[in-house]
Amino acid sequence: MTLRQVTVPLFALILFGVFWEWLVWVNDWPNYKMASPSDLWPAFWKFRWLFLEYGWETLWRTVVGLLLSVVFGTLLGMVMGLSKTMRDALYPLLVGFNAIPKATVVPIIALMFVGQHDMNTILIAFLISFFPIAVSVSIGLSTLEPEYRDILASLGASKFTIFWKIALPKTLPEFFGALKVAVTLAFIGTNLMEIVEPHGRGLGHLFDSGKISADYPLMFAVLIALALMGIVLYYVVVALEKVFAGWAERDPT
Amino acid sequence: MTNLIEIKGVRHAYRTVSGPLPVLDGLELTVPEGGFAAVVGPSGCGKSTLTRLIAGLMKPDEGEVWLHGERVKGPKSTVGMAFQNPVLLEWRSILQNVMLPLEIVDTGMSRKAREDRARHLLDLVGLTGFEDKRPSELSGGMRQRASLCRSIVHKPEVLILDEPFGALDAFTREDLWQTMHKVKAEEPFTGVLITHDLRESIFLADQVIVLSGRPAKTQYIMDVHLSGARDIEMLYTPESAEALNVLRHQIRIAQGRDAA
């Protein structure tokens, strides 16, 4: 990573903050309409311990939900990618399920497992984020050119060997593309549940508290905290992608 | 000399929604050990189906395919294949790509010996210095050379080449023809080459088989005895011109444009 790769996005971030501050100042908006960046620091400082505690809650629930998505999504994608019958059978079901707005599923899950905050939250994060992973893995596997299969199949290699040595690594770039989408989706899922559940804890709950007590800077501060966590997790995925699928990146020529 | 590849009375039809589509109908092909047969014919006449039959990747509806006196029932590690698309694995270096078949076929070679063999083959086709490059860093011709190395690294008895030079420009193609001769001299194999290029067929093979249009049967067999050293000049002798004329006429018959 060069200095330029750090300074350019950092500069853009500062510019954005300044513009935001200016916009609030020039329009003379009260902070219940739009909090300015300068209002956020006091809110962060006042609730710094809650931010740490709840931020951690939100983070680990999201990550566990995401891990479940990766395992389940990959398995489902494999089943659909390797068998045309399963693909035909499962696609409509999967698309239908994905079309249901997850906000409507949240109260159902909350009632179904009332009081199980951790499980509920993880469940929603998982339900909302496994779809892109399953679809991308299945497409990656089903679009494998027959020649790729034949170079090993003609040597008598087993189906598993072909999958392990060719199909799986060839699908990795698509998989990581989907994982980037899944990361942000999982955050949405976690927060939906945390906002809806009473005593749910997590940043979503902090946001809800801000709403109830009309503490608008706090609500904005939660949004910023979520954005920061989203960025961090996204770049963790980018780093993993570099390690496992860096070969797919071509040097610009 | 024994016959290494024997195909007798093969018939095959693909099942499609609009009924069976016959592609091969009475195909005969015999290649002696160490021989190199080129198969030419009109587009879509079932040439690629033929390669899959020899490789044991599919079974014919009727007829027999024999390799080295054994009936082909499934894929065997004594076969090597190369296609028009070099299908190199982008996440492996060129050297690792060439070594891929050695991870599947048990040759009893040590890791060091396997690597040495791959390096030797890359050297033979002129890819020294590119061992650690990624496939995307190589030109089309170089990728095809690497693909050729991979198809023979496990010392197959039979090498099946399905239009391996079809997507290359004319100059690169002629370079690769000469590389083919060099490889064949050092790494003996029995070969079947599917091609659309008649000049390629007489330059590389010692036997040219013309298939009829779909459903394909063996229409004509030409033994190639071109005298002299195998260089490109050889394609411009009166002898070659005559052979090419005969083949061109046979292809036109197969296409149904000339009377037999």
Image (cartoon, rainbow, N blue to C red):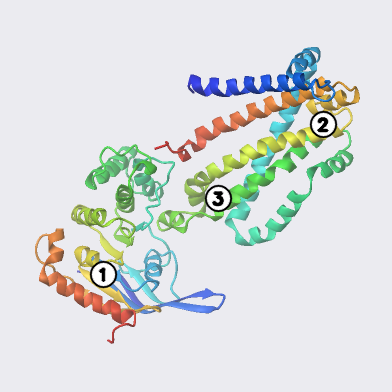
Tag 3 near tag 1, CB within 8 Å: no
What residue did someone put label 3 on? A140
Placement of B45 over or under A44, stated as above or below: below
Seen at 30% across and 70% down, the residue is B39
Discs 1 and 2 share one subunit: no
What residue did someone put label 2 on? A194
Give percent across and percent down for residue B103: 40, 46
Residue type, numbered disc 2: Glu
Between B11 and A205, the residue placed more toward the observer is A205
Task: Give how far apart the Cα atoms at labels 2 and 3 are.
Answer: 34 Å
Task: Give how far apart the Cα atoms at labels 1 and 2 are.
Answer: 73 Å
Tag 2 near tag 3, CB within 8 Å: no
Local secondary structure at mark 3: helix
What residue did someone put label 1 on? B31
Specify which label sits upstream in the sequence, 2 or 3.
Answer: 3
Discs 2 and 3 share one subunit: yes
Residue at the front extreme of this rendering = A26
Local secondary structure at mark 1: strand
**Mark closer to the observer (1, 2):** 2
Between A156 and B128, the residue placed more toward the observer is B128
Placement of B254 over or under B93, stated as above or below: below
